[in-house]
Amino acid sequence: MIRIPLIAVLLALAAPAGAQTLASIATPAHPVLKRQAFVTGDIVRIGDLIDNAGIVADDPIFRAPDPGETGAVPAARVAEAVRSHAIIGLDTGGVTEVKVTRLSRPVAASDIQARIVQALAGRYRVGPAAELYIVFDRELTTLHVDPSASDPSVTRLAYDPRSGRFDVLLDASGQALRFTGTALPGVDSVVLTRPIGRGELLKASDLVVQRRPKAEVSPEVVRSLDLAVGFAMRRSLATGQVLAKTDLTKPDLVTRDTDVTLVYQVPGITLTMRGKALESGAEGDTVNVLNAQSKRTVQGTVAGPGRVVVAGQAARLTANLEPSSDSSNAPRERAE
């Protein structure tokens, strides 16, 4: 008589927990629409767009955007597409569209060009790949491929050595991409970025190094910036013109009719005094200078800005002809 009520009490206590367990089993999680989805292939599946899609999560419903691209699918269209897959009562949660992004691995335009250049240089011997001048008929842009895809490869290559025209087929993730253009032996050339007048000094900002067809430039072409910066122009040139060595000259460090420092050098002694340049000259040039003290014309070598050196026998002879240093009108000489 005592055991029966005890069993009844135990059953009464266990009933709510059992009911909760049965309720959780009987009621699956509600399907909910996502705001954003990321896919790696060319197919969008139900599970990419809907949480708690159950056994139909792997069912395909849409084509994916191109690699690296993002597209938008209206929520109403998703609901319509999944209805035939037994998903009823989709909870959109206020989402009006789902943004679908296809993940990708970028292949830079420079890498695409490098592959084509290597193929041309290796198969047709148009010159070293590092020196090839190449121009594409349309601008190269970054290529996006699937993350697991192999690197793009050249599957077809045609080249005309006379015209330099090429036609290349590149395979990227099973997609055939065609590239055409011109490829010729080239040479690095220093090119002007602005119009430069005769006598102007060249600065680094006035110049850029560009690859140009070897057949179109002079054998005397300037190939690096350090061979042009600081030099003066012999003639005026327009923007985009290629510099030749014959276009350049050393800048004048001494200008005609300007004051200079005359330096007389003989073994054991150096004298400096004022002078006036009778002609212009660059470093290393021989110019005539009027000695302001003796009023004699001497020849010397331009050694720096406004500085002319008279050395050897000429310096000794000139020094011997100088007036006495105790003259009241004579400038002071300095011995070094």
Image (tube, helix red, strand yellow):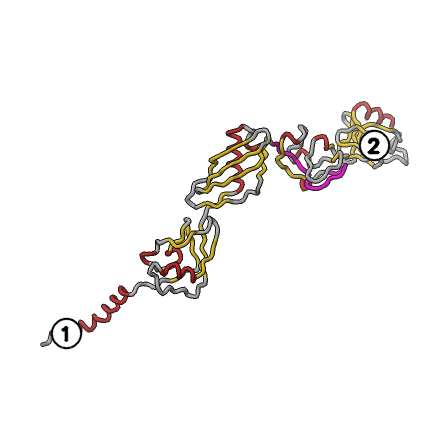
The residue segment tinted magenta is 186-201
Residue 209, percent across and down? 63, 37
Give the quarter of the image for residue 165.
top right
Q: Residue 6 bears which disc, if any?
A: 1
User: Are the residues tagged 1 and 2 within 8 Å (C-beta)?
Assistant: no
Task: Give the secondary structure at mark 1.
Answer: helix
Q: Which quadrant, please, contains the N terminus?
A: bottom left
- Residue 136 seen in render: yes
Residue 192: within the magenta? Answer: yes
Amino acid residing under circle 1: Leu
Residue 292: within the magenta? Answer: no
Which residue ends up furthest to the right in the rendered image? 328
Which residue ends up furthest to the left in the rendered image? 1
Task: Give the secondary structure at mark 2.
Answer: loop
Which residue ends up furthest to the top in the rendered image? 313
Q: Which residue is mark 2?
A: 279
In this rendering, the answer to whether 212 lies above or below 74 is above
Lateral position of residue 193 relative to residue 36, left or right: right
Lateral position of residue 243 relative to residue 3, left or right: right
Disc 1 from disc 2: Cα separation: 128 Å
- Residue 336 seen in render: no
Residue 322, percent across and down? 87, 28
Residue 123, percent across and down? 51, 29
